[in-house]
Amino acid sequence: MKTLKIAIQKSGRLNEKSVEILKNCGLSFENYKSSLISSVTNFPLEILFLRDDDIPEYVQDGIADLGIVGENVITETGADVTYLQKLGFGKCTLKIAVPNNSNITKISELEGLAIATSYPVILEKFLQQNAVPNVQVRTISGSVEIGPGLGLSDAICDIVSTGGTLKSNGLKPFAEVMKSEAVLIGNKGTEFNPEVQELMQRIRSVLRAKETKYVVLNVAKTDLKKVVELLPGVKSPTVVPLFDQDWVAVHSVIAEHDFWEKINLLKAAGAEGIVVMPIEKIIT
Ligand code: ATP
Ligand code: ZN
């Protein structure tokens, strides 16, 4: 059996979450900061630790079968790979920002200006799509946000998550170019490999579990219907008798995104002693 290779970021914003998701899939491996490669002891897989910029091409060329990397990097490199699964972390937005005192309000007003960026391919495509062809795109590899302050550019195009870096450099976001998150990518055709399918199934079950919580609560039988009606998305909750025959315990799964709202509604409907537990995996 061929040993698969998955490329993940060696250090940086995606490293920790990439390692975490693989460990949550039950994969056992050493995460030495110094090593380039680590063997999984309980699955035919090797992990390559690389700079994120190199991952799409390694996967395209088949040096790695799989990779975990930001969509921004995949699009910028233009690598020919298969998107297998969005992973829900490393979320950020590529934005154009201008100095606070700029009165630019429309994308067309970028015409004739210079924009500094580490993402020239994505930016050029965006400018073309918005019919602003005469923009000088200045490619710099880091600290793009100091461009306007140094007189290097009139605007920048860079990754923004909280906006704090822009603010401290006297810049304001002005147009959204692309949203990005970490994704699992594969070499073309690798998704048909049974081991890859097994790994993808594990990843999906870990992701599904993250989106939900396991809830156990007690409720008087008289209020049971009201409480059960608040628990959608499952075929039917499990109802267990309690020693006090007028009461039951209800076991269910609820979504993380409306968790607090749901809990308050359940309390108002008569739920008591609500216990909430994380779910490790959901196998369907
Ligand atoms: P490397 O040394 O691997 O080349 P890097 O410095 O290029 O690392 P990081 O800053 O670690 O990259 O970011 C990796 C990825 O994390 C980005 O390409 C992007 O997809 C994502 N990301 C999420 N939030 C942010 C953010 N606030 N700033 C930058 N990148 C972010
Ligand atoms: Zn990088």
Image (cartoon, rainbow, N blue to C red):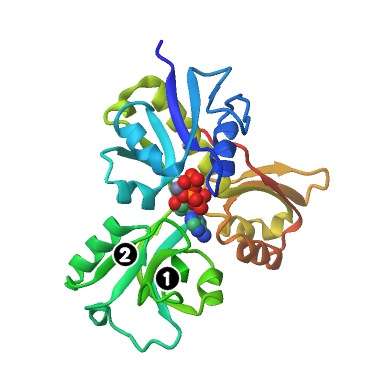
The answer to which quarter of the image holds residue 114 is bottom left
Q: Is residue 281 above or below residue 265?
A: above
Q: Are marks 1 and 2 in contact (CB under 8 Å)?
A: yes
Q: Is residue 16 above or below residue 114?
A: above
* Dot 2 crowding, Cα within 10 Å, few <14, some 14–19, many 20+: some
Q: Residue at x 78, y 44 (%)?
A: 242
Picture quarter with the N terminus: top left
Circle 1 residue? 147
Q: Reading the chain from its start, which is encountered first: label 1 or label 2?
A: 2
Q: Is residue 108 above or below residue 263?
A: below
Residue 89 in sight:
no
Specify the farthest residue to the top.
Answer: 1
Taking depth in this image into account, of 173 and 28 the one nearest to the observer is 173
The percent coordinates of residue 161 (x first, y second) are: 50, 64
| Label of residue 165 in the image | none
Circle 2 residue? 138
Q: Residue at x 63, y 26 (%)?
A: 30
Q: How far is disc 1 from disc 2 in space, using C-alphas?
A: 9 Å
